[in-house]
Amino acid sequence: MNIFENYLSKINKTILDNKDNLKLTNLENLDNINLEVPPDHFNYDLSSNISLVLAKTNKLNPINLAEDIKDLLLKKINHFEKIDIAGPGFLNIKLSKNGFIDNIKDIFKNKNNYGSKKSNKVYNIEFVSANPTGPMHVGHCRGAVFGDVLSNLLLFNGNKVIKEYYINDYGNQIKNFVESVYLRIREIKYKEKFILKKNLYPGVYIKEIANNIIKENKDINVENLNNSFDELKKLSLQGSMTLIKDDLKRLGIQHDNFFSETQLIKKDLVNKTIKQLKNKNFVEEGYLAPPKGEKSKNWKKMKRLIFKSTEFGDDTDRALKKDDGSWTYFANDVAYHSDKINRKYDNLINILGADHTGYIKRISAAVSALSDKKVKLNCKVCQLVKLYKNGKPFKMSKRAGDFISVQDLLYEVNKDSIRFMMLNRSNDVELDFDFEKVKEKTKDNPVFYVQYAYARINSILRTLKIDFNYQISVDINIFQPNEYEEKILRKVFEWPKIIESAAYKLEPHKIPFYLYELSTLFHSYWSKGNEDSKFRLIKDGKIKKEDSLAYIYLVAIVIKNGMNILGVSLPEKM
């Protein structure tokens, strides 16, 4: 139930039915009419630009047209009690008591789904996809939370979502990882000193993986790396992926599908995909221009296999093979996305780290080429997270080697704080994460403030000896919201609009922002009751006026739905 959509539909129908009386000959731009939340100082419930839009295309005076539309809407829509014309012709609308009550009842009737907009599409969201060479670090954490909450948001809207993890288990970094594990096993078994060579992994977690391999495979042969490489690779990757999956589980994240790059190679998907692009004339033997910033005289001109990505908006064409004739990482990624396209998703979404911004154009070009521009790939980049403790940058751990692990983060603060705060800013800007701030029990800690609002509501219910199953009677004869309750109602009515915008723009950070604002309104109302008995909710263990319970329940419904999307718990006591 979305009151903005509902009333906009009624407004448009009223205009269409009465276009002749309004002297409207051009109604082609009805889609430009909107219904929004007016600024607080107007003290109205809805605001529309309808007279401005229609006046322009019909060459009418917007103020005069606004007067005619105002009279018409007040006559035809019984939920509209008062309409004021503001500025150049905006209509500010106040709902009637019946309007408020009918909308409140609709929310109660559909409380678990309030805010959702059924779209029934199928999404593949690939996120995290950290190299399986060790545990997750903080850089992965933000993308992990973003991807999971975005999945929850789209699921809430009735879509089917496949949460996917692409395992980069092929290439030189895996060879270096396996060699690191091999040397640690020999260090443990034969007391050989681990000599740190270039590109090897120094973290103590490598010892943990090595110890587990020895423990579970007592007869493993590590006399020679080449002879034992395949088995050791399998066991090392299992150990590393176990660390990663454990970290994800602690963050409340579980993927539906894990796609292996090695399997992609074994199934010859790269050759098949490149052949497909060749048949479409998007691949050729040719020469690439020198990379930006590199002098031409230092650039070795070499004929190679090239994807014509500039035909799909990329800055330059892209190499599919290295100098030694092996496939580039990009070629493997093209094959992977070809497989995703063949799985017939309505939408593909990739959540990328800050260092992958330059990769977006080329992979988007590949998806367009492979799908004949029928499939769109959305890439969302999560910028860096800077950790602070006691006002100073938080240092990396010895266990990880050269990065701050998710386990370090979870040791300092709980899952709820991490999930909420990782979305406390838009994904495309850097995020400062202060350990001390997220532990505070104040308004400055958003996750605490939202959880505390829900706990306070539960405290009210305990005092009244009722629960959320209690049937609230909203009687028109006693329905008289005060200024605080009006603000709460307007904010609650805004919730479906927040969900719609967050889902359409793939911006889940809008949800914690909104929940904090709603919670602030509720806390302000509570505090006002402590200052002025006129606004007190409870007297002598009883609710002062029955309809106040409606506002309290509405806040609880929205907070619960919102925090479920965020994957953050709601304690009943704090």
Image: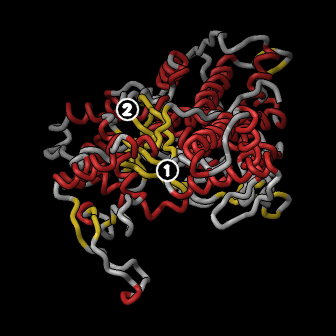
Q: Residue at x 66, y 34 (%)?
A: 249
Residue matched to label 2: 122
98, above or below 332, in the image:
above
Instruction: Tell me which numbered mark, 2 or 1, is placed earlier along the sequence.
Output: 2
The answer to whether any part of residue 50 appears in the image is: no
Instruction: Tell which of 255 and 530 is nearer to you.
Output: 255
319, above or below 84, in the image:
below
Give left or right: position of 447 versus 389.
left
Secondary structure under the numbered disc 1 in the rendered image: loop
Crowding at dot 2, Cα within 10 Å, few <14 / some 14-19 / many 20+, comes out as some
Instruction: Tell which of 287 and 512 is nearer to you.
Output: 287
Camera-near label (2 vs 1) is 1
Q: Residue at x 49, y 19 (%)?
A: 106
Q: Residue at x 76, y 22 (%)?
A: 458
Furthest-front residue in view?
Answer: 223
- Estimate the x, y position of residue 273 in percent, counting from the top left: 28, 48
Instruction: Tell which of 540 and 184 is nearer to you.
Output: 184
Residue matched to label 1: 170
Give left or right: position of 248 versus 152.
right
Give left or right: position of 538 versus 235.
right
- Estimate the x, y position of residue 35 in percent, counting from the top left: 40, 41
- Estimate the x, y position of residue 328 in percent, counting from the top left: 40, 60
- Estimate the x, y position of residue 73 in percent, counting from the top left: 33, 33
Q: Amino acid at mark 1?
A: Tyr
Secondary structure under the numbered disc 2 in the rendered image: strand
Q: CA distance from mark 2 to mark 1?
A: 29 Å
